[in-house]
Amino acid sequence: MNTLFGEKKAEAKKIVLTSVDQYPEAPISLGTTLSNFTGDWRTFIPVVNEDKCVKCYICWKFCPEPAIYIKPDGYVAIDYDYCKGCGICANECPTKAITMEKEEK
Amino acid sequence: MEYKPIRKVVSGNYAAAYAALHARVQVVAAYPITPQTSIIEKIAEFIANGEADIQYVPVESEHSAMAACIGASAAGARAFTATSAQGLALMHEMLHWASGARLPIVMVDVNRAMAPPWSVWDDQTDSLAQRDTGWMQFYAENNQEVYDGVLMAFKVAETVNLPAMIVESAFILSHTYDVIEMIPQELVDEFLPPRKPLYDLADFEREPFSVGSLATPADYYEFRYKIQKSMEEAKKVIKEVGREFGERFGRDYSQMIETYRTDDADFVFMGMGSLMGTVKEAVDILRQEGYKVGAAKVRWFRPFPKEELYELAKNVDGIAVLDRNYSFGMEGILFTEAKGALYNTDAKPLMKNYIVGLGGRDFTVNDVRKIAENMKAVIEKGELDVEVDWYHLKR
């Protein structure tokens, strides 16, 4: 099973350009879903209840960002650097294992 | 190889088509619109006769024409198109995509008035309305400058990775025949070698990459700055390429503002495009009549030659800015730009804006004389009568 939380993702997280000279001349290969942190957009935050999770991975398939990953134990978890808080995962979860809760900032 | 020009009688549009041919463009995508049509007809003829190895992409609109050029240019090709007025307006969104993705596409825009009322005649408002799209703009005075401009534009564009627009006047140039000197293909090839793309989507050896994808607020800003840096660099490149063109082919384009008899002038006429040919003619006549006048033709409107304008402005008492265009709610567009460029300098000539020739209305030597008389009176009095003069208005 592809966990999508391997080396590539860790590498992408390191790409933070801090000086204009580091940028390519043209906007290429920028803004992949991995290097764009979209985690500061949300108001609500998905929380996984492993007691209800049946490891169907429907949430993982539906997530429009690389925000859901599969842990070695087979349960899903959320990478909050990417989660916009859209709630699609909670809506699609057949066992209601994911709930959206107001995030305290 | 010694340079022996090929003299040919061509319209401005054919000059553009021949320049595209000689530049060895690989992809042309265009939609016919008066008065641009004969440019792409001529290119289609080159292809039909087997004179050119060009992929012609027939499209259903100008928006698609530019989209096709963007795809071709991103894949490493030398891409060309041409349009006018409403067609250029329809391209507007795509113009940003071309410059933002840093693609050196070259386009000929045949200046035509915007409708309504429907008009197919000369007016610069169409091209100047694209001022902020990140395209360089060169205004040609005559058919020779259309031809030379296209060749130079490719070289400049491919050096700084920004697209460029060559602007010629509807009918006054596009459909009027004149002798021009064309350059033998081998010498064009020396001047303009094949394009080396910055990034090439068709390079299958390198890792896959995406073009123009999302940039969040954390990254977008820096790309805008990079375009501005390249525009500044383009000023140097334009002068170098213009000088090289002069050394190779005898016509020097190293000045971004071409000055004509300005050295001891009391005041100068400033403008762009074909109307400046009339002005130069008038300057010669007015000089004989005792007016100390000169002409300043703005060749490159983007990047805007601020420094050259300053050098001009500090030595004259007045500048009559002739605008064949208008920004509603303000004034002529070149007038705004010129005043703005000088505001923080110590050059403070009296500047007056004359709106002339909109929608193709004739602008003659006699009109320049009347403007000279008025400008002289304004300077003697030391104050403007009106700032913006709708010169032709039927009162």
Image (cartoon, grey):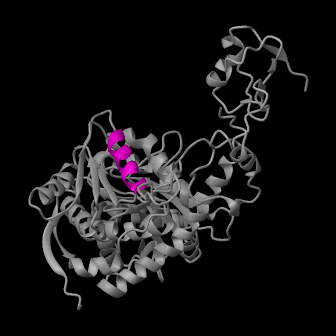
Q: Position of residue B332 (x, y in %)?
A: 47, 50
Residue at the spot x=48%, y=83% of the render? Answer: B264
- B227 up-or-down from B316: above or below: above
Quadrant position of residue B176: bottom left
- The answer to which of A1 and B78 lies nearer the viewer is A1
Residue at the spot x=38%, y=52% of the render? Answer: B324
Relative side of A60 to B134, left or right: right
Q: Given the current orientation, which residue lies at the most extreme left position?
A: B49
Magenta segment, principal secondary structure? Answer: helix
Relative side of B129 to B85, left or right: right
- The answer to which of B322 and B210 lies nearer the viewer is B210
- A53 up-or-down from B135: above or below: above
- The answer to which of B41 and B385 lies nearer the viewer is B41
Relative side of B210 to B61, left or right: right
- The answer to which of B131 and A20 lies nearer the viewer is A20
Q: Given the current orientation, which residue lies at the most extreme right position?
A: A104
Q: Is residue B72 covered in magenta? A: yes
Q: Position of residue B225 (x, y in %)?
A: 64, 57
Q: Position of residue B235 (x, y in %)?
A: 52, 71
Residue at the spot x=14%, y=60% of the render? Answer: B46
Q: Which residues are magenta?
A: B63-75
Q: Position of residue A55 (x, y in %)?
A: 71, 18
Quadrant position of residue B143: bottom left
